[in-house]
Image: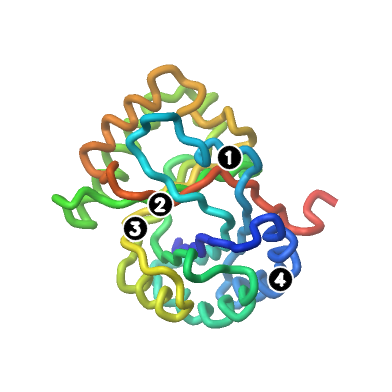
Amino acid sequence: MQRLLILLGSGQPNNLEALLRDRELWLSEIAGSLGGSLRLAVQLEGDPLATPPPGGARCIRPLRGLVEVTIPGDEPTELLAIVAALTRQLDGVADWSKTTVSIGRVHEVLPAASDVVLVTLAANRLPSIDRAAFHAYWLDEHAALTTSMLDETRKLAMGYQQVHTDQAASERATELTGACPSSFDGVLQCSLARINDLPHLSVPGFAEAIMKDEENFADQSAQMLGAFMRTLQPEGAGL
């Protein structure tokens, strides 16, 4: 699968949900033109990432909202065909000077049972390794460590996907939208039914082990972009 992520900055975050709902049908039709799916989300009220603990080493810029299109296949440039149409629909919604656009390949580590809460976090590789090495370690070593620390119940409670950035496609999408240039190498997405289903918050020693292993491939001193988000379920869902 390939995924286009429009990581929204907004000058009017309190109105963002209503603005996205107003455009939901059109955005869904654009995604459907490629046989793809649309997901919309807004920053969760009381987002834990918005108030990191004092003395924390990481700097995380808040993510206000998300427009996400996922398509089947291995060709990332197919998503470029719909970027202009998406940009027009998001006129007046996105603050493009604070919005980041990324295209990449989706790797599913754990399937999602629920995405009521969606943790999205964009990060950079260590300067000492290239993007291919970053992606390989993240998927082959780090993901294995993550799953090894979870029992079957925990695995069922958390969907875990890695979106590995395609640099050329992301740069072209950034140009087409006028979004803020970025150097993010990958985007982590965890899908949950509840905040406390995230093992970083509820499994003793998990967060510490994960952060220690990240020293092998991720630049922990670089600014990240992310949030706990509330997925906007498609209108009519469950009726």
Which quarter of the figure has residue 14? bottom right
Q: What element carries label 1?
A: loop
Residue 180 left/right relative to 19: left
Instruction: Tell me if mark 2 has few (under 14), some (14-19) or many (20+) residues whose alpha carbon lies within 10 angstroms of its own.
Output: many
Asked if the residue under mark 1 is in contact with the one under mark 3, i.e. CB atoms within 8 Å, the reply is no
The x, y position of residue 206, in whole percent, is 39, 24
Residue drawn at (42%, 75%) of the image: 173
> Which SS class for mark 2?
strand
Disc 3 and disc 2 in contact, CB within 8 angstroms? yes
| Pointer 3 local density, CA inside 10 Å: few below 14, some 14–19, many at least 20 | many
The Cα–Cα distance between marks 4 and 3, rounded to whole angstroms, is 27 Å
The residue tagged 1 is 47
Q: What element carries label 4?
A: helix
Q: Distance between the residues labelled 3 and 2?
A: 6 Å
Closer to viewer: mark 1 or mark 4: 1
Reading the image, the residue beneath label 3 is: 184
Q: Pick out the residue farthest to the top.
A: 204
Q: Which of marks 2 and 1 is nearer the N terminus?
A: 1
4 or 3: tag closer to the N-terminus = 4
Q: Name the residue under label 4.
A: 23
Residue 36, image x and y in percent?
57, 68
Locate residue 62 relative to residue 221 in the image: left or right.
right
In the image shown, does 108 or 30 lie closer to the viewer? 30
Residue 136: horizontal and vertical position, in percent?
25, 49
